[in-house]
Image: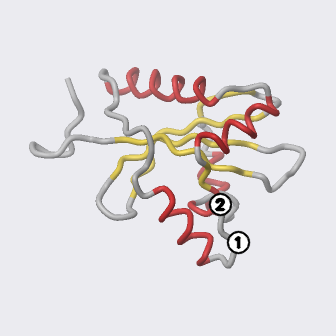
Amino acid sequence: MSGKINDDEEWVLVQSAFLDDEYKDDIAIYLVMETVRPGLYRIQGGSAQASARAGWRLDTGGWLRSRQEYGDVGDHSLLTDEEAQEYLDAMGLRLKDGKELMIREFRRVNGYDPVLLPVDPKFKERRDLARKRLKLPPKA
C-alpha cells in the first residue's frame, strides 16, 4: 500500500531538521516529516525533538508548534543533516536514530513506509529567503 494525495499523485516526504537555540544551555533539534509540494510549500506532519536531557522523543505535546508560534523555529532555522549532526554530537545523539523513529511512527500510523527524498530540493532557497526576510546573515 502506498500513500496517495489523489489518484495521480503520491505522497513524497522529506525529513527536515530545525534548530531551537533560544536557550544556549538547552538546545533542541526538531526533526519534521514534511510533504513536499510544488514551490516552497511544505505540509508538516509528525515531528520529533532531540535534547541532551531527554534524547529523541516524539513531539506529541506540540512543542514544535509552540516554538514556531514564537518565531524561534522556522525556515530560518533549517539545518542540513551535517549541521544537525554537529549539534547532536554534543548531545551524544545521532540524527539517524531520530529519522528511524519518525519512519517507524509513520509506518505505525499509516501502515506503509514513507516515500522519502534524501534532501528537500528547495532547502537552500527556503532557508535563504527566510533568513533574508528576518534580516539574518546567510548560512554558508
Name the quadrant of the C terminus.
Answer: bottom right
Numbered disc 1: secondary structure = loop
Residue closest to the far left: 7
Q: Is residue 85 toward the left or the right of residue 118 in the image?
A: right
Which residue in the protein does label 2 denote? 140
Residue type at the position of mark 2? Ala
Numbered disc 2: secondary structure = loop
Q: Which residue is drawn at 52% across and 45% down?
A: 16
Q: Which residue is drawn at 74% across and 43% down?
A: 28
Q: Which of 68 and 120 is in front in this view?
A: 120
Name the mark on residue 137.
1
Q: In this view, does 40 lie above or below 67?
A: below
Name the quadrant of the N terminus.
Answer: top left
Q: Quadrant of residue 42?
A: bottom left
How packed mark 2 is, by other alpha carbons closer than 10 Å (few <14, some 14-19, many 20 or more), is few
Q: Which residue is drawn at 56% across and 61% down?
A: 75
